[in-house]
Image: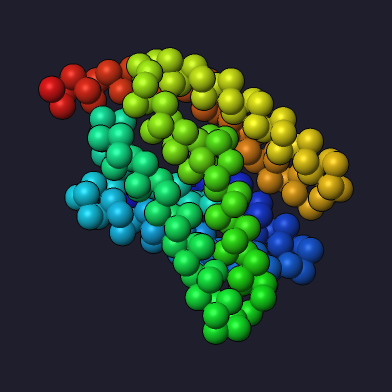
Amino acid sequence: MIKIDFSFYIAILLALFARQIDVYLTYLIAVVLHECGHLVMASIFKWEIEELKISAIGGFLTFKNDLSKPVLQCFLVAITGIVFNLLFGFILLLIDGPSNLIYTQFAIAIFNLLPISPLDGSKLMQAMLRVIFDYKVVLNVMKISNIIFLFIFVSGIIALRWEQYFIVAIILAIFVGKFQAAVPYIYERYRIQKAVGE
């Protein structure tokens, strides 16, 4: 099932209003490639897709019984989107491709490494922490790290005077708020999936 988040429509309208639709379309190409990376690795592990949600800051795939999957598989599925962007970026560099598309590939890869929910960096961090800690502890650590890294991200935007990225920070803050509120539900879903899997 494909769902379009309201923020996606806002982003399209803002891009049209600012006459930056070509920039946003370049970004969407990078996002599609990124999600293809996740899909390729997930299909190797025979994961079933539950939903693809498209928002202003990217696409977010959810899979059936995603919380009970083996940690290594979770790590590999999360990182493959980033790898696809980096590979495509390097290929474009080698063939002297469009500079804006090259920049966007690397920017999307770096941005997704941030350990802020729902970005891939948070999924990578969760996978690594799950090797050591119980999932309830992992979720509580993620709640704290979300706030810390969101603060660092916003501070970086202010320090570098990248005002154009404030909208990204606002959207991230909304997602972080949703994650913080959903932690009890996520843990309960994890317990159910684990019990069914056993």
Where is residue 166 shown, x and y percent of the image? 76, 44
Is residue 34 among the parts visible in the rendering? Answer: yes
Residue at 28%, 51% (x, y): give it: 42
For the C terminus, the quadrant is: top left
Q: Which of 72 and 77 is in front in this view?
A: 72
> Left of 185 or right of it: where is 170?
right
> Left of 84 or right of it: where is 93?
right
In the rendered image, the residue lying farthest to the bottom is: 95
108 relative to 104, above or below:
above
Where is residue 72 shown, x and y percent of the image? 30, 39
94 relative to 185, above or below:
below
Where is residue 190 shown, x and y percent of the image? 31, 23
What scheme was used to colour the molecule?
rainbow
Where is residue 46 shown, x and y percent of the image? 19, 50
Residue at 84%, 47% (x, y): give it: 160
Q: In which image quadrant can residue 26 be found?
A: bottom right
155 relative to 130, above or below:
below
In the rendered image, the residue lying farthest to the left is: 198
Residue at 84%, 41% (x, y): give it: 158
Q: How many marks?
A: 0
> Left of 119 or right of it: where is 160?
right
Is residue 177 among the parts visible in the rendering? Answer: no
Q: Nearer the viewer, residue 176 or 154?
A: 154
70 relative to 78, above or below:
above
